[in-house]
Image (cartoon, rainbow, N blue to C red):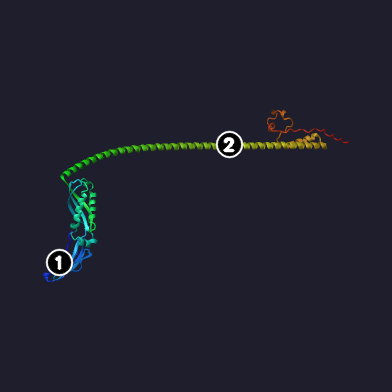
Amino acid sequence: MAIRTTTNFVIGACALCGTLGLGGCATTLVEPGHRGLYFAPSDGGLRREVLSPGKYKLGWCFIFCTANRIDDFDVTFSTRTERIHTSSVEGLDLDLTLSVIYRPIVSELYALDTDIGPNYYEEVIGNEFRSACRGVFARHSYSELQKKNEGIENEVEAELRRRTEGRHVEISSVTLEAVVYAPEIAEQIRKKIAGEQDAARQRASIAWEAERKEQILVAEADEKKLSLEREREQQRLELERDGETARLKAEQELAALETRKRVLAAEAQMDRLGAETAAAKKIIEAKAAAEAIRQLARAHAEEKRAETAGVTPMEVMLHAYDALGQLGGTGTTIVLGDWAHVPSFLFPRVPSLQSAFTLPMTPLVPAASTPAPARPSPGS
């Protein structure tokens, strides 16, 4: 990269001043995308301050023009293309066209101007770039140039950055523009490419066939899986149906047992009520028998008292009958004597007679008859 100086401008200004006999101020411009360093030979030499784009004064021109100038640097990315002849790892000749993109480091312009100078590409980047390309391509075969194009570019870029480290320049990228093979290599490459294409077609055909078989196997597996799932679902439904049937059957059996339990409880209740009724009936009958005995005993006692008091047996009997009539109540038939000798057909509609043979009766032992006392005569 060449540095634009103000030498021509200074010479022209001086000529104009000499012609007109006038003096003036010399100026210069720093364009956009550029930076400058002010150089004043009589005032400290090259200054470290980096000048931004703009217009700057150089000095006065009266009789002699000023020697001050601004060293101008293009700080945008620049591209240089190099044609490089090298050899592959097999020793085959290769003609390559590569490009490098670079720019100076703005903060290091003073060091770049003082250490290397304005022609820093020719002094540093160009030589290192060509050397890095030869070294990298010598490690690769010619067949790798198409397959590993980007990788080889990255190798050249990394090697160039390593070589230019500390040289105040920035390497952006390296690109491989073109590769020219020898005729015999080109023919071999074409044959190889054709063979690779045939192999690729065969691989594609094999892959397609394998994919088709895989799809068939997947379809069969899916169908078998669906069949197994349907069978499993059917078995599950059958088990649920069997379980539901068993549950309903168990519920029915439980309901039948519950019904049987309630029936047995009702029967037991009825038996208990029957037993209580029978017991109550027996108690009533026993009470009635006891009351009858008590009344008979009372009648006997009355009879004894009557006898004692001189009452006739007929009167006592009448009183006894009255007592029995009061004991039996209305509509009651009382039979006295040996019940076994009374025919049942004589009293077919008498309830008390029908049930009299089933009741336990306590035989009444008649008291020993005593002769009635002789009625005293009216004269006694």
185, above or below 377, in the image? below
Q: Which mark is residue 10?
A: 1
Q: Which mark is residue 357?
A: none
Question: Is residue 195 shown to the viewer in this render?
Answer: yes
Residue 240 picture location, percent across and down: 45, 38
User: Looking at the image, which is closer to me, 92 or 257?
Assistant: 92
Mark 2 crowd level (few <14, some 14–19, many ≥20, 10 Å Cα): few
Question: Is residue 79 shown to the viewer in this render?
Answer: no
Q: Helix, strand, or loop for circle 2?
A: helix
Task: Give the CA distance from mark 1 to mark 2.
Answer: 138 Å
Residue 356 picture location, percent across and down: 70, 32
Q: Amino acid at mark 2?
A: Leu
Residue identified by numbered label 2? 264
Q: Helix, strand, or loop for circle 1?
A: helix
User: Looking at the image, which is closer to me, 12 or 324?
Assistant: 12
Image quadrant in which you'd find residue 19:
bottom left
